[in-house]
């Protein structure tokens, strides 16, 4: 069956939350309260980011790159991406993080994948642009649900893979969900069927099983 995989980046493709790494390293006092406000949905991604950036002690892109280079990819993600390419499945990254580190890390790993993310600006001061926000909801900088619905082709199966708060809405609408952490807990709370995963090895095995079942007509 024709399938499009919509995949979160932070905590999913890479094992760490890169936004959290940058904030924890570069921001001064007060960022935890802002992050808690965002998690409680009292602050939008845009408002939280702009207020947090004011606490940063550097806006040097090279400092950011040195931190970003600590990122560790899920050890089977490259295999999963290669499998999707062989099978003709689309793989699209939807992130409420930043284009700067996603582009840098994909290039580092030799991966060429489409992605949608917030735009990080360094000059004259740290700022963010949210070209994929929703006109109806300001919670996330990137409305993953809106993008998923726009990018999903008629007759295609939508599969969502993620771990966090910004994944809640698209996961609820997807045909199939692979989830961990907060997203898995949310799916349980709202009665959305989701397969728990620890790494892309779990996902890869399941997707290969789909292929065998479809070939056998079961």
Image (cartoon, grey):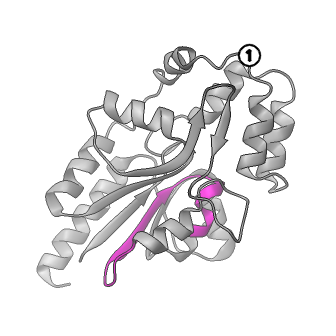
Q: Is residue 17 visible?
A: no
Q: How many marks?
A: 1
Is 102 above or below relative to 134? above
Tell me where residue 21 appears, x and y as whole percent.
62, 27
Say which residue appears at 67% left-offset and 74% top-offset.
190
34 sits left or right of 61 in the view: right
- Residue 45 included in the magenta stretch of the image: no
Is 77 above or below relative to 139? above
Q: Which region shows up in magenta?
A: 152-170
Tell me where residue 37 appears, x and y as whole percent.
84, 47
- Quarter of the image with the N terminus is bottom left
Tell me where residue 67 appears, x and y as whole percent.
54, 19
Is 77 above or below relative to 42? above
Residue under label 1: 57
87 sits left or right of 141 in the view: left
SS of the residue at dot 1? loop
- Quarter of the image with the C terminus is bottom left
Category of crowding for the residue at label 1, using alpha-carbon neighbours closer than 10 angstroms: few (below 14), some (14–19), many (at least 20): few
Tell me where residue 65 appears, x and y as whole percent.
49, 20
Q: Is residue 58 visible?
A: yes
Say which residue appears at 67% left-offset and 56% top-offset.
140
Q: Nearer the viewer, residue 164 or 53?
A: 53
Say which residue appears at 29% left-offset and 71% top-offset.
3
């Amino acid at each position: 069956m024709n399938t499009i995989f919509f995949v979160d980046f932070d905590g999913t493709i890479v094992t760490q939350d890169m936004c959290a790494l940058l904030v924890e390293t570069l921001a001064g006092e007060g960022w935890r309260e802002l992050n808690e406000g965002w998690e409680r949905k009292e602050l939008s991604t845009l408002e939280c980011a702009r207020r947090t950036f004011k606490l940063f002690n550097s806006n040097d892109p090279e400092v950011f790159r040195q931190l970003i280079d600590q990122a560790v990819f899920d050890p089977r993600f490259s295999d999963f991406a290669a499998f999707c390419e062989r099978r003709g499945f689309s793989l699209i990254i939807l992130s409420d993080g930043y284009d700067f580190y996603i582009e840098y890390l994909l290039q580092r790993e030799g991966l060429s994948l489409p992605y949608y993310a917030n735009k990080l600006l360094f000059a004259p001061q740290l700022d963010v642009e949210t070209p994929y926000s929703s006109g109806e909801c300001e919670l996330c900088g990137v409305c993953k649900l809106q993008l998923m619905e726009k990018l999903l082709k008629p007759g295609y199966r939508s599969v969502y893979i993620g771990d966090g708060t910004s994944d809640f809405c698209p996961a609820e609408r997807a045909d199939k969900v692979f989830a961990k952490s907060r997203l898995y807990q949310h799916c349980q709370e709202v009665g959305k069927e989701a397969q728990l995963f620890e790494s892309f090895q779990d996902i890869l095995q399941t997707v290969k099983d789909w292929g065998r079942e479809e070939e056998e007509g079961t």
